[in-house]
Amino acid sequence: MNPEGSPISRRVRDIPPSGIRRFFDLLASMEGVISLGVGEPDFVTPWHIREAGIYSLEQGYTSYTSNYGLLELREELASHIAGRRGISYDPQRELLITVGVSEGVDLALRAILDPGDEVIVHDPSYVSYIPCTVLAGGAFVPVPTNLENDFQVRAGDIEKRITQRTKAILLGYPSNPTGAVMDREELVKIAKVAKRHNLLVISDEIYERLVYGVEHTCFASLPGMKERTILLRGFSKAYAMTGWRIGYAAARDEIIEAMMKIHQYTIMCAPTMAQMAALEALKGGDAEVEEMVADYDQRRRVMVKGLNDIGLTCFEPKGAFYAFPSIKGTGLSSDEFAESLLIEDKVAVVPGSTFGQCGEGHIRCCYATSLEEIEEALERMARFVKRHRAR
Ligand code: PLP
């Protein structure tokens, strides 16, 4: 026992429980709810990818792979990244197959942080960044972003927060929860800041394929940035493979080696069946990704127009599958809004405050659900907002 008499470490006790959990507990006990809450594709993994997973089992591929992951998968990834982004990674030493980007975030932070090292993170941002930083012994330094600049983080705002202890900048764009995509020019400025202050950049690009009418810039492709970037990517979103638990990290060999050290003692290797399926996704999944993106784009337009029509001002999200409207006109906090909307009109959304202080005054609506459900949810939300409009 520790001096407080708890069997749980102080570090873990100090991490607040995920704000989303309460809503999902409530949701699980209700019927007739339309969920815009969970951030996952409503598509099933394309059949030929599932078949590759099944076939791998039939063939008896049931043992561990290399700690780094199947070499064939790493080779395919290296040529995929080189072909699409023009960056060359050595498949033997600069790529690591992970259990989703979730593991990638954890490994990256644990590999680079010493106690008290600081990580600059944009606010709002994905829910795991801050807890994983704290669990790795680091301290997080939030950088506010807002509706006025489409939730893109500014290089100048990052630079102002750099101290002697700053080790890395963590970027998660296209963004969960806002759907923001970074402009290339601003990323170039951030790259200069990273170079000037000798910082690493952890770039979570899990939504890189899900962009609408804009180009995603891979941070590692910017001049001089391959050496400074830990690039994290996965299969969950673009290929609708959330349950397979598969992703990868790309970085210079010294960093991948350090991440692999943690991975080999804690995970051993990503699931073999999922690695075989991921290989098939890379080789033959492009057409389906494009179809899914076109589908999300249609839903995105309906969602954004609908929210703006209701009076929930929404900037146009250019990536991922989230809209992040302002609810300030209702006078409710984002927590109150989400809870009352769920109880009164049975629509589940996630309070913006879950993603950081700057998320307050917003809600996250995931549009990876059917058009019929989106339209019905918008009608319910219109009724709710009418009743709650601030007097
Ligand atoms: N990063 C971001 C920004 C996400 O939105 C998610 C999942 O929602 C993850 C990482 C985790 O993804 P994975 O399924 O690859 O672990």
Image (tube, helix red, strand yellow):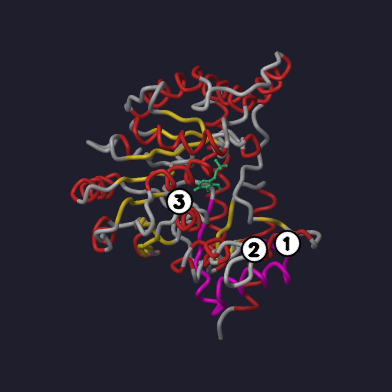
Q: Residue at x 36, y 62 (%)?
A: 141
Q: Nearer the viewer, mark 3 or mark 1?
A: 1
Disc on the earlier residue, 3 or 1:
1
In the rendered structure, which amino acid carries the disc numbered 3?
Answer: Ser
Is disc 1 placed on a helix, strand or loop? helix
Circles 3 and 2: CB atoms closer than 8 Å: no
Instruction: Answer with left or right where residue 149 lies relative to residue 367.
Output: left
In the rendered structure, which amino acid carries the disc numbered 2?
Answer: Pro
Disc on the earlier residue, 2 or 1:
2
Disc on the earlier residue, 3 or 2:
2
The label number, if any, that marks residue 7 in the structure image: 2
Residue 61, position as x, y percentages in the image: 66, 18
Q: Which residues are magenta?
A: 322-348
Q: Residue at x 40, y 48 (%)?
A: 181
Is disc 2 placed on a helix, strand or loop? loop
Q: CA distance from mark 3 to mark 2?
A: 36 Å
Disc 3 residue: CB within 8 Å of ligand 1: yes
Q: Nearer the viewer, mark 3 or mark 2?
A: 2
Q: CA distance from mark 3 to mark 1?
A: 25 Å
Residue sitting nearer the eye, 342 or 115: 115
Q: Tell me the crowding category of disc 1: few under 14, some 14 to 19, or many 20 or more residues within 10 angstroms, Cα based.
A: few
